[in-house]
Amino acid sequence: MISLSLCMIVRDEEKVLGRCLASVKGLADEVVIVDTGSADRTKEIAAQYTDRIYDFVWEDDFSAARNFAFQKGTCDYLMWLDADDVIPEREARKFLELKRTLPKDADVVMMPYATAFDEQGRSTFTYYRERIVRNRAGYLFRGRVHEVIPPTGTVVYSDVCVEHWKSGTGDGVRNLRIYEGMERRGEPFDARALYYYGRELLFHRRYEKAAEILERFLHRPDGWVENRIDAARQLSRCYAAMGEKERALESLLHTFAYDVPRGEVCCDLAGCFQEQERYDLAIFWYRQALHAEKKPETGAFVEEDCYGFLPALGLCVCCDRLGRYEEAAGYNELAGTYRPQSPYYLSNVEYFREMGVQAESFPAL
């Protein structure tokens, strides 16, 4: 069985750190905590689990802090988590099995990361991250923000899922502030940094600037294909927010240049046509979403709802607008198979009950 160092960077995480460290008790052979300036009980809580606690002066660079933490790890492999991450109890046995059976030549272990959840606590947003790397093999994080270790060597994919349960709002402008500081200082932006800078600007509703940055990213020859697909989606949202509907649609169609349309793109297209009351076109794209193939192994952001719940709900709305009430009710029942506690599904159940509409069996897709 391999030995494993868990290496974390933390700051003012007293509300969640204990939960995280309790979830990995018995899983990690060593815990390294690097504190970047806590003013609360973070280090006191960390001391309940480890004596490997270090201070690091924060310099607006996540990679620098994480690489410092990795330098302190002494085991065969290094793993990172954020303070508001957990390894759920149901995953613990699988994690230990991974440690026991990991091939001797494994360099990087990719693991799914779940960061959003529905009413029943099921993941609705997942993607693979490089979670474990071989120690003393030159693996380093890159990027001041949204830091990453480029996977090289022998890469192993595991189905052990890490869950991210954020507590509070945190510093909502920190990432944008770091990117804007880089821009002011004239620091070079690689393709990944441009992509995430554009996303941060969009999140803060700086639509014109976001569109400019995302366009710059899409014109670079070195952008990762998954980032290109998502950047085109985010660019579409920028143009829609600026009232440029045609350019918003063109941006979505641009994703076809990279791969077969994903469920997320199909739902975006359907939403565009639904907003225009072009319900037949919206229905076509919602149906495509139901048949779309998820590709988590590519590292893409996977919005689970776009492959079931959202297209079924969209089909319900569109069919209702066209007066196809039994079909609409059937699609609502289909939506309920994905998220039976959704308030949207439950509200529609009451709506069709009051109308006296009997849902047909799930409509042909």
Image (tube, rainbow, N blue to C red):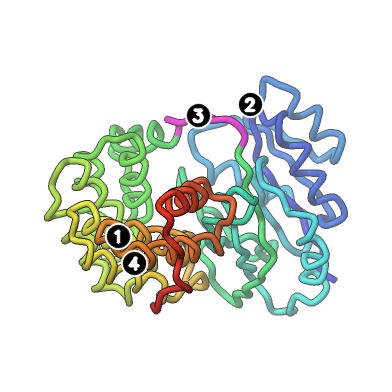
Instruction: State the mark number for residue 171.
Output: 3
Q: Sequence order check: which comes first, mark 1 or mark 2?
A: 2
Q: Are marks 4 and 1 in contact (CB under 8 Å)?
A: yes
The three-letter amino acid code for the residue at tag 1 is Cys
Q: What is the quadrant of residue 50 in the picture? A: top right
Query: How far apart are the two marked residues, 3 and 2, measured between alpha carbons?
Result: 14 Å
198 versus 300 height, above or below: above
Q: Which mark lies nearer to you, 2 or 4?
A: 4
The three-letter amino acid code for the residue at tag 3 is Asp
Residue that carries the numbered disc 4 in the rendered image: 286
The residue most toward the top is 39
Q: Is residue 169 magenta?
A: yes
Q: Could you tell me which residue is drawn at 64 percent across and 51 percent down?
A: 120
Most foreground residue, 323 or 121 = 323
SS of the residue at dot 1?
helix
Residue that carries the numbered disc 1 in the rendered image: 318
Q: Quadrant of the N terminus?
A: bottom right
The three-letter amino acid code for the residue at tag 4 is Tyr
Q: Sequence order check: which comes first, mark 4 or mark 3?
A: 3
